[in-house]
Amino acid sequence: MTVTIEEVEAYLSEHPEAVLSLKLKSTEGSNTISFAERRAEALEERLAQTQAKLQELIDVSKDNERLFQACKTCLIELIESRDINALAHIIERSLGEAFSVYGHHLFLFEDGEVSASPDLTRIDQSKLSRQMGSLFTTSAPWLGAIRPYEAKTIFPNAKSVASAAIVPIRRKKQLIGLFCLGSAEGNHFHAQLSTHFLELLADVIAWITPRADTVDS
């Protein structure tokens, strides 16, 4: 006797309770499992997936809040700063742990002899361009892995920097310097990373630089 799909559908429509007594073949062997049990297992799996996704969203939210607070603290301290030589210390204190920042250096473009301190170098733009090669950026931030000899140029006082964020600093569309952050992790700074905060940070540095120069003079 052959039963058509239409006849099965008609029977189940008239006797929906019969679905619960159906037996399904287990995917793990020759055993059978009732439709009700399989449905319960499927619901449990979906619940577990939903709970895992919810926990992931909670963790991301907490991490974003932590990073936001670190960014806010950093920007406030930079705006209140009156000494450009203290910028690197503010960055290290505010962003070091939150962003896994291992190295940092600020380059300001000036004509004449190179003036360097542990975290700040005043240098001619063309000279720095020759030293940095393809890493020298004038438009958008550059993020990615760097080689040991490149790390030595960008972060002269840091060791084991494997990736970097190099951010142009502009004042009224004029390039006045580069701000560099480094990490010991090779994939920490990468091209897909958002650069919104880095660009905001560069804007704040550009804004306070004249004030710091005025105080220094």
Image (tube, rainbow, N blue to C red):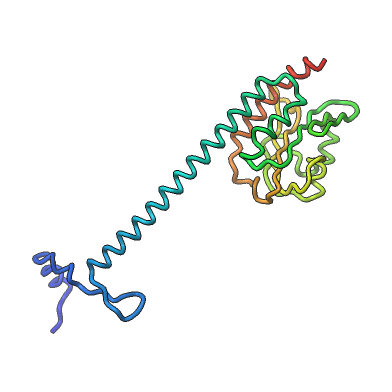
**Residue 63 coordinates in the image, percent (x, y):** 52, 41
Report the front residue among 66 and 140: 66
Question: Residue farthest to the left?
Answer: 14
Residue with the most extreme right position: 113
Report how many numbered discs are placed on residues in the image.
0
Eyeballing the image, is 114 above or below 41? Answer: above
Judged left or right of residue 213, residue 144 is left
Please name the residue shown 17% across and 71% down the image: 21
Image coordinates for residue 130, horizontal then vertical, percent: 84, 40
For residue 161, above or below residue 7: above
As drawn, 196 above or below 152:
above
Q: Quadrant of residue 117?
A: top right
Image quadrant occupied by the N terminus: bottom left
Question: Relative to 139, does residue 160 appear above or below in the rendering?
Answer: below
The quadrant of the picture occupied by the C terminus is top right
The residue lying furthest to the bottom in this view is: 1
Q: Residue 110, position in %: x, y?
A: 83, 26
Q: Residue at x 82, y 34 (%)?
A: 118
Residue at 35% x, 60% y is 45
Left or right of 162 on screen, residue 196 = left
x, y percent for residue 199 = 63, 32
